[in-house]
Amino acid sequence: MARITLAEIADKLGAELRGDGSVEIQSIAGMEKATEGQITFLSASKYRKHLAECQASAVMLKEADLSFFDGNALVLKDPYLGYALLAQLLDTTPKSASNVAPSAYIADDAIIGEGAAIGHNAVIESGAQIGANVQIGAGSFIGQHAVIGAGSKIWANVSIYHKVTLGNDCLVQSGAVIGSDGFGYANDRGKWVKIPQLGSVHIGNNVEIGACTTIDRGALDDTIIADGVIIDNHCQIAHNVSIGENTAIAGATTMAGSLKIGKHCFIGGATVINGHIEITDGVTITGMGMVMRAISEPGVYSSGIPLQTNREWRKTAARVMKIEEMNKRLKSVEKKLNESN
């Protein structure tokens, strides 16, 4: 197991060291479970009460919390960011592939970059381009003329269809499907006529795509995922959707076709967003939101009914069913009041 001293950590994170810099750290743990040889972090002052009992060899915290802890400390403006950066330094996640497996199928005209690794039973089809140091996990499929950028990591059983472009340093979790057909049909007197999806999917650099997430190819133009976007597990992104830089999308979110989402948005889990609308930059939609209209102003948006006891919910639902009747009665009362005045 890798070991790193507190002094080395402070240098790499740009933190202020308070205490013994020679102390060795081998892993990170939560504050209540951390023991000797481990480092933890305090990102919210409301958890200061745990500092007195903390057994970690060191704690990452803010200057304002330093007086509440008498052990070794790394002082940072953002301890949570420090935790993220240190976790990268101490990451022990294995590679999705470490060499080119004999059982992998690679088309003769596919281009494989230096240092690329391709796992067992993976398929690389004709014209595909695999960048330098790419990892492609076992059982994955890379379609004709697909492009995988340098340094990207693809876990097992990922399907990337023909002509899809994936940027540099992306991470695609197992079971993801990129470039499947969008849901495009015409109706001929009750009979569905399939519309071939002739566009593709273009994904920028440093994008993460969660397990079992589906991103459909465009009908004519491409589906676009910009640089720095992070997408959680089990999301559905329909054809011709465009997602701006550094937007975060939580699990089970569903997006209909031709939707445009701006930069630096936060989409809560299980949100459903209508197609052919635009959401501006800097929008937060809380979990289980139902977005039916365009959003033109930054801010936080919510919908749905928060959890109640079943008894309270039944009363609320009963009242909702009577809103139209109540509205008519209210208007009638207002009319009589106005007439009397």
Image: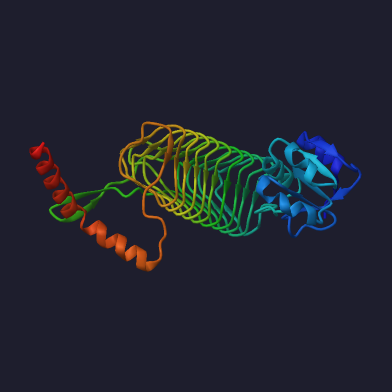
Residue drawn at the location 10% of the way across and 42% of the way down: 335
Drawn side of residue 329 relative to residue 283, left or right: left
Residue placed furthest toward the left: 339
Drawn side of residue 276 relative to residue 210, left or right: left
Q: Residue 57's x, y, as percent?
A: 84, 51
Question: As rendered, which of 92 and 48 lies closer to the eye?
Answer: 48
Question: As rendered, which of 293 and 156 lies closer to the eye?
Answer: 293
Drawn side of residue 4 relative to residue 196, left or right: right
The number of callouts visible is 0
Question: As rendered, which of 287 and 238 lies closer to the eye?
Answer: 287
Quadrant showing the C terminus:
top left
Q: Residue 226's x, y, as percent?
A: 49, 35
Residue drawn at the location 36% of the way across and 44% of the way down: 239
Residue placed furthest toward the front: 341
Q: Residue 60's x, y, as percent?
A: 76, 44
Q: Quadrant of residue 11?
A: top right
Which color mode does the image show?
rainbow
Residue placed furthest toward the bottom: 311
Quadrant showing the N terminus:
bottom right
Is residue 74 placed above or below 326 in the rendered structure? above
Drawn side of residue 38 relative to residue 206, left or right: right
